[in-house]
């Protein structure tokens, strides 16, 4: 992840959320209807990606019980005694599973997290926690389902960019999926109101499932932090750094943060989708011409991990800024 808004210093952004956030809601089931309906949905997704960088999806085909079970698996994991969780502690960002808390990580103000790879599931699931006993089954089911949604969305976004839905198909099929499973305490238990400091996600897109309210995004038109309302059965989607690169700046990464919820402890599961570890992401050549020269250097997920490792103690560790030409 890279952090901070590039347009306005974060500390100057008003945090009062007095205005409702525009939240496009996409009915994903309509993508597989007739071609006119599909085109309309592709246009709606493109509009949301260009204007805002985020939207929510409903009718995505993931059952509520699958989502609830993933949240339960996460919640049961974080309730384990510290020794069981710390088995997964590591300073090495390339470990297949990694547990950390705010005491060791510079952007987590008040968050415990478990990060692990999830695709191909059969390669990674063996490293996932065995406690609680339901973890692998419940989280594995959700991971596979949310990846299907990510591929559908990726196709639609590529189509919306005029690149065609089969564009780089193999690289997306073989791409990586990182699950960031987060646990935030109830606000009253902390002396901070922020769980996770402002940052953007490195991948093409992130799909977020949360147990309750807490996510905020910077609204580009007003530069105000806006609370994201979680609609029932919906998943929140936002654009990441590598989508900004691939689209040569037509789509912009979304700066977001997590506030602590005043009423309850909060679980969120961010599924971040990118290319395979060493596969470079470049500006799509179809989106580069004399008027639009390439705006970003090529980079891979591995380059991002190197960048984070080198900037571990630094709160200003924006990955995308280093890619700008
Ligand atoms: O907890 C949230 O709402 C956001 C989590 C997040 O941004 C992340 O894991 O990258
Ligand atoms: Fe994030």
Image (cartoon, grey):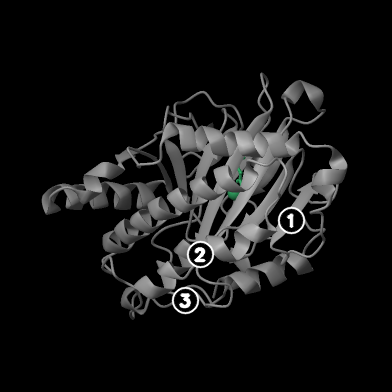
- Secondary element at tag 3: loop
Residue topped by disc 2: 274
Q: Residue furthest top?
A: 263
Q: Position of residue 45 (x, y in %)?
A: 31, 49
Which of the two discs, 2 and 1, sits closer to the camera? 1
Question: Which residue lies at the image location 68% right of the left edge and 68% below the top edge?
Answer: 305
x, y (%) of residue 161? 30, 63
Of tags 1 and 3, the one toward the viewer is 1
Residue 130 against residue 242 in the figure, above or below: above
User: Is residue 101 left or right of 168 when viewed as pictured?
Assistant: right
Which residue is label 3 attached to?
282
What is the tally of numbered marks visible in this picture? Answer: 3
Q: Earlier in the sequence, mark 3 or mark 2?
A: 2
Residue 152: which numbered mark, if any?
none
> Which is nearer the eye, 31 or 241?
31
Residue behind mark 1: 98
- Quadrant containing the C terminus in the rendered view: bottom right
The single residue placed furthest to the front in the displayed view is 133
Picture residue at 61% right of the left edge, 32% below the top: 15
Q: Secondary structure at mark 1?
A: strand
**Is 120 left or right of 75, judged from the image as shown?**
left
Quadrant position of the N terminus in the picture? bottom right
**Front residue of this view, candidates 89 and 52:** 89
Mark 2 touching mark 1, by CB under 8 A?
A: no
Residue 292, image quadrant: bottom left
Determine whether the residue tagged by mark 2 lies in a helix, strand or loop.
strand
Real-space Cα separation, disc 1 to disc 3, in angstroms: 28 Å
Q: Earlier in the sequence, mark 1 or mark 3?
A: 1
In front of the other: 300 or 293: 300
């Amino acid at each position: 992840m890279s952090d901070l808004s590039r347009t306005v210093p974060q500390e100057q952004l008003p945090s009062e959320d007095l205005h409702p956030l525009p939240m496009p809601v996409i009915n994903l089931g309509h993508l597989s209807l007739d071609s006119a309906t599909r085109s309309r949905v592709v246009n709606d997704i493109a509009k949301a990606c260009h204007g805002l960088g985020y939207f929510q999806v409903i009718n995505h085909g993931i059952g509520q019980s699958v989502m609830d079970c993933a949240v339960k698996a996460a919640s049961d994991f974080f309730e384990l005694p510290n020794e069981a969780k710390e088995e997964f502690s590591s300073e090495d960002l390339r470990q297949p599973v990694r547990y950390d808390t705010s005491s060791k990580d510079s952007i987590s103000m008040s968050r415990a997290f478990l990060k692990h790879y999830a695709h191909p599931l059969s390669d990674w699931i063996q490293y996932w926690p065995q406690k609680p006993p339901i973890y692998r089954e419940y989280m594995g089911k959700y991971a596979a389902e949310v990846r299907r949604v990510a591929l559908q969305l990726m196709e639609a976004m590529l189509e919306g960019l005029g690149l065609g839905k089969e564009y780089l198909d193999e690289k997306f099929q073989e791409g990586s999926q990182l699950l960031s499973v987060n646990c935030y305490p109830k606000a009253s238990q902390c002396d901070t109101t922020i769980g996770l400091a402002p940052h953007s996600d490195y991948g093409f897109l992130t799909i977020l499932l949360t147990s309750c309210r807490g996510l905020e995004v910077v609204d580009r038109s007003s530069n105000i932090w806006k609370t994201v309302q979680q609609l029932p059965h919906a998943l929140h989607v936002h654009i990441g750094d590598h989508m900004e690169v691939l689209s040569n700046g037509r789509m912009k990464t979304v700066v977001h943060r997590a506030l602590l919820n005043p009423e309850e402890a909060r679980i969120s599961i961010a599924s971040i989708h990118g290319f395979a570890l060493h596969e470079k992401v470049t500006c799509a050549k179809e989106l580069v011409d004399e008027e639009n020269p390439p705006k970003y250097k090529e980079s891979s997920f591995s380059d991002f991990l190197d960048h984070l490792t080198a900037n571990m103690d630094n709160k200003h560790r924006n990955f995308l800024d280093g890619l700008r030409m």
